[in-house]
Image (cartoon, helix red, strand yellow):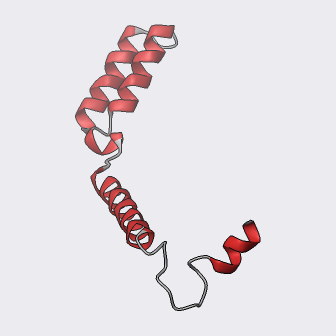
Amino acid sequence: MFTTVLAHGPWNDSGGPHAFWPLFPLLWALVLGGGFVLVRRRMTARPATAQDPTRNARALLADRFARGEIDEDEYHARLAVLRYDA
């Protein structure tokens, strides 16, 4: 049966209509649509550091203060430097 389908399928050069021709525009629509989605996502995505560059530094500083690695005076001094640089 499979060999019969291969021998007489729509890809045969018999000059008859091809049964799979509606799939080709669908395939191109999927390829172009996927490309559009990827380009659009790339253009609209912004890294978190672009919005607030000192956000990660303040979070790290607060974490070190909470663990007791630095005291309150050092925390406030370094936080003031971060605020000054921003």
Residue drawn at x 46%, y 82% is: 17
Residue drawn at x 34%, y 39% is: 48
Q: Horizontally, is 85 left or right of 14 in the view? A: left
Q: Quadrant of residue 34?
A: bottom left
Q: Quadrant of residue 30?
A: bottom left
Position in image of residue 83 (x %, y %): 25, 30
Q: Nearer the viewer, residue 35 or 4?
A: 4
Position in image of residue 11 (x %, y %): 59, 81
Q: Horizontally, is 55 left or right of 27 in the view? A: left
Q: Horizontally, is 8 left or right of 74 in the view? A: right
- The N terminus, quarter of image: bottom right
Q: Quadrant of residue 8?
A: bottom right
Number of numbered discs on residues? 0
Position in image of residue 5 (x %, y %): 67, 71
Residue drawn at x 28%, y 38% is: 52
Q: Is residue 37 above or below residue 58?
A: below
Q: Is residue 7 above or below residue 37?
A: below
Position in image of residue 16 (x %, y %): 50, 86
Q: Horizontally, is 80 left or right of 74 in the view? A: left
Q: Nearer the viewer, residue 29 or 12?
A: 12
Q: Is residue 60 above or below residue 33?
A: above
Q: Nearer the viewer, residue 1 or 39?
A: 1
Residue drawn at x 48%, y 72% is: 20
- The C terminus, quarter of image: top left
Q: Is residue 50 above or below residue 25?
A: above
